Image (spheres, rainbow, N blue to C red):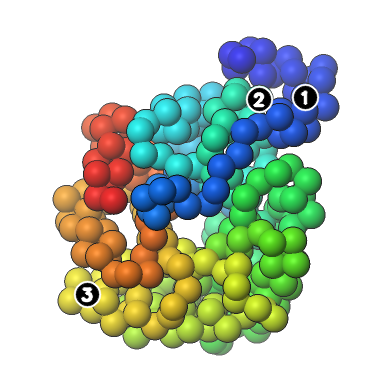
Amino acid sequence: MSITELLDARARRPEAIAEAAERRTRRPLLGESGRMMIVAADHPARGALAAGGDPLAMGNRADLLERLCTALQRPGVDGVLGTADVLEDLLLLGALEGKVVIGSMNRGGLAGSAFELDDRFTGHRAEDIERMRFDAGKLLMRLDLSDPGSLNTMQGAAEAINELAARGLTAMVEPFLSHRADGKVRNDLSAEAVARSITIASGLGGTSAYTWLKVPVVDELDEIGPALESTTLPTVLLGGEVPDDPEATQERWHKALQLPNVRGLVVGRSLLYPHDGDVAGAVDAAVGLL
């Protein structure tokens, strides 16, 4: 299906999305290698459109979908993480066959808003992920110990974990200890803060049987091990912003990937919007680390 046909299907046959979801070929969360490479594209629903110095890079949906389809076609790419609108576009394009699909759940903490840390669950619900035959739900949990709104996010995260687990679905939790500086939310990437956020997230909900963690690689290269050894839960590394020094970023990923509970990478903008524009090359380099 072309972009033009996608637009026509959305206008004339909204039921085509459910039909595509029903016939989609599924696969296990982890393949034979025991590793996972997921491309992330859940940023636009939070109003975060910037990538690589372009403030509206992710604002062109046709361009974003083209980049996602390129990434998903590369060998070694296991799946995608996105909000309902993005995943449904990819379903209509036939790009999710045999892929892991992770639905993004809480998008209420809009980038730059006064309520950014009161991150309500306004995206996928557990029942939606089950109905669409997706494989997991992702939730962001930024905690500012001085902001009462963080408790709402924490409670919502625990409820989402319980609801997913009751359906046998994986919850992928992305925890941070955060604070405001100059009016902006900043995540603390020190080894101590990352370890504390991991232990808080690991204890959420009535069971951790279906909980995975999506965590940043800490600033201190020598402290990657101690920070990520604070849990036994399966863990994937997040990509973050488009890096100024891709080689240094890949070195940190490579070191962290040696830890036994680290199962792979979930990377978005740095693969979809690399400085040289070569999406396939950026994806292949990341897959090579696995």
Question: Is 42 displayed left or right of 166 in the figure?
Answer: left
Q: CA–CA distance between discs 2 and 1?
A: 7 Å
Q: Secondary structure at mark 2?
A: helix
Q: Which residue is mark 3?
A: 220
Q: Look at the numbered discs 2 and 1 and tell me whether their residues touch, using CB distance below 8 Å.
A: yes
Please tell me how crowded label 3 is: few (under 14), some (14-19), or many (20+) other residues with Cα within 10 Å.
Answer: few
Return the residue at label 2: 92
Residue 130 visible, this angle: yes
User: Please, what secondary structure does the residue beneath circle 1 have?
Assistant: helix
Three-letter code, disc 3: Glu
Badge nearest the viewer, 1 or 3: 1
Q: Is residue 221 above or below residue 266?
A: below
Helix, strand or loop at mark 3 = loop
| Amino acid beneath label 2 | Leu
**Crowd class of label 2 (few under 14; some 14 to 19; many from 20; radius 10 Å):** many
Give the quarter of the figure containing the N terminus.
Answer: top right
Closer to the chain start, of discs 2 and 1, is 1
Say which of marks 3 and 2 sits in front: 2
What amino acid type is highlighted by mark number 1? Ala
Q: Pointer 1 and pointer 3: residues touching (CB < 8 Å)?
A: no
Q: Please, which residue is most extreme toward the front here?
A: 32
- Residue indicated by mark 1: 16
- Whole-percent x, y for residue 60 in the image: 52, 29
